[in-house]
Amino acid sequence: MGLLSDPVRRRALARLVLRLNAPLCVLSYVAGIAWFLALAFPPLTQRTYMSENAMGSTMVEEQFVGGDRARSFARDFAAYRRKSGALPVAWLERTMRSVGLEVYTQSFSRKLPFPDETHERYMVSGTNVYGILRAPRAASTESLVFTVPCGSDSTNSQAVGLLLALAAHFRGQIYWAKDIIFLVTEHDLLGTEAWLEAYHDVNVTGMQSSPLQGWAGAIQAAVALELSSDVVTSLDVAVEGLNGQLPNLDLLNLFQTFCQKGGLLCTLQGKLQPQDWTSLDGPLQGLQTLLLMVLQQASGRPHGPHGLFLRYRVEALTLRGINSFRQYKYDLVAVGKALEGMFRKLNHLLERLHQSFFLYLLPALSRFVSIGLYMPAAGFLLLVLGLKALELWMQLHEAGVGLEAGGGPGPSAPLPPAQGVGLASLVAPLLVSQAMGLALYILPVLGQHVATQHFPVGEAEAVVLTLLAIYVAGLALPHNTHRVVSTQAPDRGWMALKLVALIYLALQLGCIALTNFSLGFLLAATMVPAAALTEPHGPRPLYAALLVLTGPAATLLGSLFLWRELQEAPLSIAEGWQLFLAALAQGVLEHYTYGALLFPLLALGLYPCWLLFWNVLFWK
Amino acid sequence: MAAAMPLALVVLLLLGPGGPARAESPRDSLREELVITPLPSGDVAATFQFRIRWDSELQREGGLSVLLKADRLFHTRYHSQAVHIRPICRNARCTSISWELRQTLSVVFDAFITGQGKKDWSLFRMFSRTLTEPCPLASESRVYVDITNYSQDNETVEVNPPPTTTYEDVILGTRRTYAVYDLLDTAMINNSRNLNLQLKWKKPPENEAPPVPFLHAQRYVSGYGLQKGELSTLLYNTHPYRAFPVLLLDSVPWYLRLYVHTLTITSKGKENKPSYIHYQPAQDRLQPHLLEMLIQLPANSVTKVSIQFERALLKWTEYTPDPNHGFYISPSVLSALVPSMVAAKPVDWEGSPLFNTLFPVSDGSSYFVRLYTEPLLVNLPTPDFSMPYNVICLTCTVVAVCYGSFYNLLTRTFHIEEPSTGGLAKRLANLIRRARGVPPL
């Protein structure tokens, strides 16, 4: 600190920062990206290991043999479901009661803000059925949840069958120390959200539901299962939850343990595990998985019903049975045994899962990158913004010095002009861009009925198109707002605005990177170069193109293409556009139905900030 | 039989406690009994009671105690044990006393596991033992089977062997019928060499809702996150037409800071004003919150009592060794006089079966019930105990190193102080130069 309080050395340092600013920025950006790409390579990835003592050394013996029973339950369930066209509540109640559970139902209804075209639903009402297996000689203070979501189509009936067969098997055992809740929800995640809100007696998303009748204490962990075939070739595990929250790594380790024990083939993001980490192939494959996870986590949408449990601090993950063209297939007994093992180990827990990591990235199922190792990547990117802001601040400083005090050593002089220019001219663009953001957040849903009356579009289309219209209108609007600026220092106006915008962006990205690294990193990687380069001089069209291509909307579009590319299902342009429109609608819907924060974050935070840079670019 | 029962009662009344003619109270007497009752949940409860009065050491084997086999008793959903010892006067002037030991063991068998999905039960299936002989020391050794709900239509259920006698009494406000098997009755055992009581359903019981008790309660924590929450207690009064008051006693640890102004009591959608509230606020680390309320429960209603709380931060030495397990909040205690369906007669404690003492009766029109709700598990904000050292060190260093200097840098401006060279001569020269109008040196 002595370095900075000594004016002579300070000036030298300032000169260094000013002179080497561009190379430093480039170096920092490249370092950030390189660090991120290096995350999949062995010194930075580590082997996962079980931290929780209660689940570590004690091996359990799985005895589940109810494969036939599961299949017959599944057949009955599918038949009843076809007959009634909805979840066969009465049949489920009867069956759960017959396997000895304490059964309750919960009905819920929800009117979505606008029709959901992907899932074809608008006014949703359904019924959740859950059965509680009470642990003997215990006081119902803790519980585990096994949940199966049922959508509108007749998938997942095998999962229901397996749930019932496992319930019947679990019911005959006496070693349970925690109650187990077997939950079948209707309408996928909407039902899960309704049940969770009712269980915790809160109302986060405006869901209308009947109060629950039965409780089973604090939920310690949850496992969701999606299974649509009698045999599976592999099990895929999903960890990313709402707003990028992740379950404790120990839960994933537990799943992996039982995959290995049962010889099951397990995948992450649909990708097989690389075996060889010493050569280049393994890490490269890991990098693909890592990128997929980053995209998935950045989207902030729950990657399965488990994602909604995380809000309530219930560690949860989703298992998906995949039936592909692979030769070797596993039947329901193998899956059931893995689940039985997991539940028995979770039953051993003395405390909530807390020992292992909550913030991590996964290049493979058995490898992880901890927060301490991936954070520098985001740090380097944000450093670019910091360096640029520092440069601007010093330039403003020196411009002030040059104007007011001539060559004299007047150190107190630069402050007043810098402030004077800043405040007056900054208010208008800041206000206008924030107002645009607010409009982007509120108007699409609010104005959907007006739009449908005046244009030949449906509600969902109206919302998406309004969204895009406001987004584009924002580009036209604000660069006419700086007429008030004094003419005496033409450069200082945009410099002050850019300074504010840089700091604003750096703060936002820093906060996002702390809570959802993937989103923060993705936005930083795209927005930082344009933000650093933008200025009203030089090749304006080039800058403008760069800004548009790295804006929030273009980032989303690019991410969609990258995502499908990594999944080895590349998109054509038209498909990509359709997917983009659907993703916009989904993003808005998920904000209203589950409380996902990506939409408000982009609309109220990053979009206005990005408009400020646009404003800088077209400064006259 | 019905005539014989009151007769026996009268005879025993004469020998009742406290009576003046109690001079020859039975010495070294042992009474044992087993009561088997169905529960609303569909499970079967078995309650053993052994009452011994002894002057000297007494050892016994046989009788009901052959059923007490540990591996079966721990295969159950619930068990509780109680031991009562009390002195009994041997004569009116109480010059010498006997001791009475009463042992109670209550076990709830999981009907689903023991009956393989059916509701049938037998002694052998529950205990893996049958009764072979009465205890040689026992003066009374009986098995009671609750057959209240089955006795109306004998087609649905069959108790085997058929009881020779039945016993009727008012228990918890309803009339119950018990089949009585007296092991001292030699015909009982000798017929088959062993007694394996069993109950069989002739046709499967329809899935009608089992009769629930008039008063029951549930409790849960609502809300999420580590800052706030809400304690909710649901009180159910299922009595079809009678409202009755309930005394609700809550003792909540100080680290949940209750907001008493958020206390809401609603029944049937309307606010329910308690007729009496006693609240003693908590003192940190000294005493818990105490909240006691008298609430009138309307007939056939659910009453929700909820109060919000904030989770306190504990000192880091105050956490338990397993802080992430959560902290237990003790159950609420509900005390109520629940109206009876059938008026109870005054009971003679000596003569009636031992299990009657488990259900005290205050007067004929109501009976006393004390319920404990489930305990709750609440997570408090918990630091990561593996890290405090690092965190404290790092934080202190950062604060110490950075804060002062940054504050300095942000609030002050720095001048370069030119060293005052020259001293007096220079000052003089400057004075002259100023007088001449020339800039100073």
Image (cartoon, coloured by chain):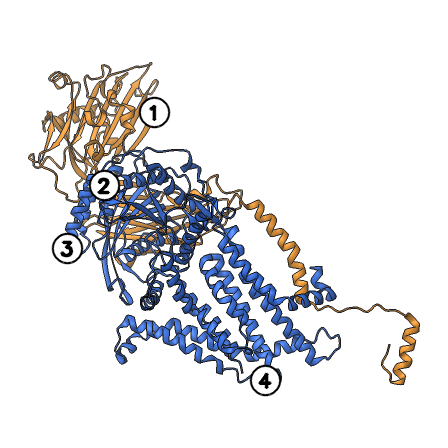
Chain colours: A blue, B orange
Vertical comparison of B415 with A424: above or below: above
| C-beta proximity under 8 Å, tags 1 and 4 | no
Lower position in the chain sequence, tag 4 or tag 2: 2
Name the subunit of mark 1: B
Circle 3 — which element? helix
Q: Is label 1 on the same chain as label 4?
A: no
Image location (x, y in percent) of residue B171 = 20, 36
Residue identified by numbered label 3: A84
**Residue B85 has which mark?**
1
Q: Nearer the viewer, mark 1 or mark 4?
A: 4
Name the subunit of mark 2: A
Residue identified by numbered label 4: A486
In depth, the one of B202 and A71 nearer the eye is A71
| Disc 4 from disc 2: Cα separation | 77 Å
Residue identified by numbered label 2: A165
Label 1: few (<14), some (14–19) or many (≥20) C-alpha neighbours in 10 Å: few
Circle 2 — which element? helix
Label 2: few (<14), some (14–19) or many (≥20) C-alpha neighbours in 10 Å: many
